[in-house]
Image (cartoon, grey):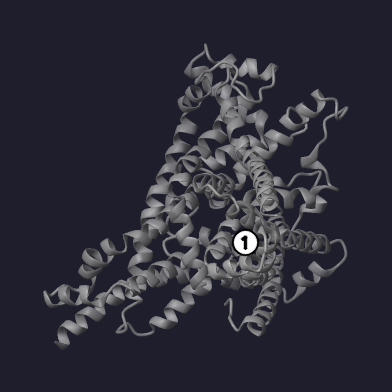
């Protein structure tokens, strides 16, 4: 008995450790790379042999001429615009559930959530096809209808960048986010609707007084989650839409870090930006979690 | 009164549907447009804009693309990473999840928590780059497969599912002398098929769409996504390369394709698997996100 037990234990460990090792290797070992922010790292040379730099790179980050203020402004602006847009998917969910015929409703659901499952490269390919300054179909159409006299370059328009990027993310994600709310709507007690009908409430009043209050807990959790992720702008989106013309309004912390490290090969500065972002994010995440705990008694972490 | 509500009901329903269908057009038309462009006759469509129907009908773009070694190879890499990557993710995460349900495994709670924390911990792009390089994963196919072997989100889904499988199934097999590995392969895996399908479908879409690892670390193992990215960011030089490449392939069709027609066709090829897979497996995606929402 003891022997089979020991054999089981051995097998069980064999089914656990290799995978746990992978987790450590790919998610935790890279954290050691944060030490690059504190030394003068030269690629190819071991970190232990590099010259200690202390907080020099952080000082450089906060000194004049750094792109940090720009990067923080853009990251926060895109983050807040995204949060501002978040009620839209809840409204969309209510509108979709108002469609009576279930086949049609399913078709609408599938069609609207499709863009969520394509890569940002394809998203960019699509927006390029439609909005590019030479040959973009939207420009062609506007010119043909004489609504504009010369093609507009929306993809390189600095002033429109924040709004345009928010529209891109709405287009990509709204349908899929709505599905989460549709799930929440179907779990609202039908008796509440019946009671509202008895009281003479119409469609609109039912949505206002039954559906929306029923969705608020889901909304609050998702909202606070997105506040926790405020600084995690989507690198892939920024990367594909970034160009020389819109740089000043699109450079985010992630992009700034990438540019410093992998374009200018200043690995230490790039890492310092990443460390700054991660630490600030963690503070925001715990603050958001504290708020959730106080409001709902649940925790997101 | 009742009549009036019935009317307003209908009018609301009509405009609501109209609005939603407009949104549907905004989401579907771009794909449709790219499709009709890719099957139009390239030099004709370059001169006249199209909106609803292709101009002419030809597969010349597709034919040209698959004659190029580079693109055929990229398609192969994309398919390979999707199949192998998904299989590795599902199998490894399932086995790990099963082992973590066993009370006799010491430290299982700590191991589980440390793994879940990976959802929130990210070292950032530069430490990640340096680490992968030091593991020798640069331009190595394993780069697409190993880092995604264990995904915390699927681990939660699968572990939750395994925990609610009745223990009696395992016990009867254990009396017959089966060990944990046999139990996993013969009993747990087949019984977990519904949740494994969810994990597989999510994972396959992710594998097909991922490109940052490819872009930063494996320029010599390009996927369809990367080929498309290169084409978008550096059109002229790519077309030159394409043309010189094509000259050896077939001389009669060269003049027919344009940079735009090739771009549309690559976009279409990179999108097609998603368009074919997503609508049919939508319920798997939804059930995955619902279980995730409840647990998370």
Is residue B192 shown left or right of residue A226?
left
Q: Residue at x 21, y 76 (%)?
A: B168
- What kind of element bears circle 1? helix
How many circles with numbers are drawn on the protein?
Answer: 1
Q: Residue at x 47, y 78 (%)?
A: B113
**In the picture, residue B54 is in which quadrant?**
top right
Residue A276: x and y, percent? 71, 71
Query: Looking at this view, is A50 or B9 the one in front?
Result: B9
Residue A287: x and y, percent? 69, 80
Above or below for A250 versus A50: above
Above or below for A95 versus B181: above
User: Disc 1 is attached to a residue of which chain?
Assistant: B
| Residue to which mark 1 is pinned | B126
Query: Looking at this view, is B110 or A274 the one in front?
Result: B110
Is residue B43 shown left or right of residue A158?
left
Residue B162: x and y, percent? 33, 71
Which residue is most to the left?
B176
**In the picture, residue A156 is in which quadrant?**
top right
Residue A140: x and y, percent? 76, 26
Above or below for A228 versus B203: below
Is residue A29 in sight in this rendering? no
Query: Looking at this view, is B124 or A92 the one in front?
Result: A92
Is residue B11 shown left or right of residue B241?
right
Is residue B116 in sight in this rendering? yes
**In the picture, residue B91 is in which quadrant?**
bottom left
């Amino acid at each position: 008995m003891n022997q089979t037990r020991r054999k089981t234990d051995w097998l069980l460990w064999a089914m656990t450790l290799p995978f746990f090792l992978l987790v450590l290797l790919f998610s935790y070992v890279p954290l050691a790379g944060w030490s690059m922010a504190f030394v003068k790292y030269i690629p190819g040379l071991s970190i232990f042999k590099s010259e200690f730099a202390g907080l020099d790179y952080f000082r450089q980050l906060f000194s004049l001429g750094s792109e940090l203020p720009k990067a923080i402004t853009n990251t926060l602006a895109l983050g807040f615009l995204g949060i501002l847009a978040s009620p839209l998917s809840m409204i969309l969910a209510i509108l979709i559930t108002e469609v009576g015929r279930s086949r049609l409703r399913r078709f609408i659901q599938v069609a609207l959530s499709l863009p969520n499952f394509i890569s940002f490269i394809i998203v960019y390919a699509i927006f390029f096809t439609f909005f590019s300054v030479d040959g973009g179909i939207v420009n062609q159409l506007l010119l043909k209808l004489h609504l504009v006299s010369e093609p507009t370059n929306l993809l390189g328009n600095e002033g429109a960048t924040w709004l345009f990027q928010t529209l891109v993310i709405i287009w990509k994600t709204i349908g899929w986010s709505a599905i989460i709310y549709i799930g929440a709507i179907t779990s609202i007690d039908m008796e509440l609707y019946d009671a509202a009908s008895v009281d003479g409430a119409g469609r609109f009043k039912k949505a206002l007084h039954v559906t929306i209050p029923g969705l608020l807990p889901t909304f609050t959790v998702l909202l606070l989650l997105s506040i926790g992720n405020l600084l995690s702008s989507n690198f892939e989106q920024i990367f594909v839409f970034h160009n020389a013309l819109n740089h000043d309004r699109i450079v985010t912390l992630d992009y700034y870090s990438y540019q410093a490290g992998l374009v200018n090969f200043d690995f230490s500065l790039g890492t310092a930006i990443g460390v700054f972002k991660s630490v600030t994010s963690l503070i925001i995440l715990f603050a958001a979690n504290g708020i959730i705990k106080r409001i709902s008694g649940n925790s997101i972490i | 009164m009742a009549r009036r509500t019935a009317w307003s009901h209908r009018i609301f329903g009509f405009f609501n549907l109209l609005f939603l269908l407009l949104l549907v057009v905004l989401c579907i038309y771009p794909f449709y447009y790219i499709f009709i462009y890719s099957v139009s006759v390239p030099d004709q469509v370059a001169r006249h804009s199209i909106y609803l129907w292709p101009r002419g009908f030809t597969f010349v773009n597709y034919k040209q693309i698959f004659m190029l070694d580079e693109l055929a190879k990229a398609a192969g890499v994309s398919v390979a990473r999707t199949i192998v990557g998904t299989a590795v993710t599902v199998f490894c995460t399932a086995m790990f999840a099963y082992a973590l349900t066993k009370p006799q495994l010491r430290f299982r709670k700590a191991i589980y928590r440390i793994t879940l924390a990976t959802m929130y911990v990210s070292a950032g792009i530069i430490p990640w780059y340096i680490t992968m390089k030091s593991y020798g994963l640069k331009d190595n196919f394993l780069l697409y497969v190993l880092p995604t072997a264990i995904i915390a989100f699927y681990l939660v889904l699968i572990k939750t599912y395994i925990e609610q499988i009745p223990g009696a199934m395992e016990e009867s097999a254990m009396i017959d002398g089966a060990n944990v590995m046999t139990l996993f392969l013969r009993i747990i895996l087949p019984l977990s098929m519904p949740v494994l399908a969810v994990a597989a479908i999510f994972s396959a879409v992710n594998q097909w769409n991922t490109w940052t690892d490819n872009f930063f670390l494996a320029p010599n193992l390009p996927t369809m996504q990367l080929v498309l990215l290169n084409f978008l960011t550096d059109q002229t030089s790519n077309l030159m390369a394409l043309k010189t490449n094509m000259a050896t392939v077939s001389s009669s069709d060269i003049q027919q394709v344009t940079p735009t027609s090739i771009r549309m066709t690559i976009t279409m090829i990179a999108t097609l698997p998603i368009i074919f897979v997503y609508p049919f497996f939508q319920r798997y995606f939804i059930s995955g996100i619902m279980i995730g929402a409840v647990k998370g």
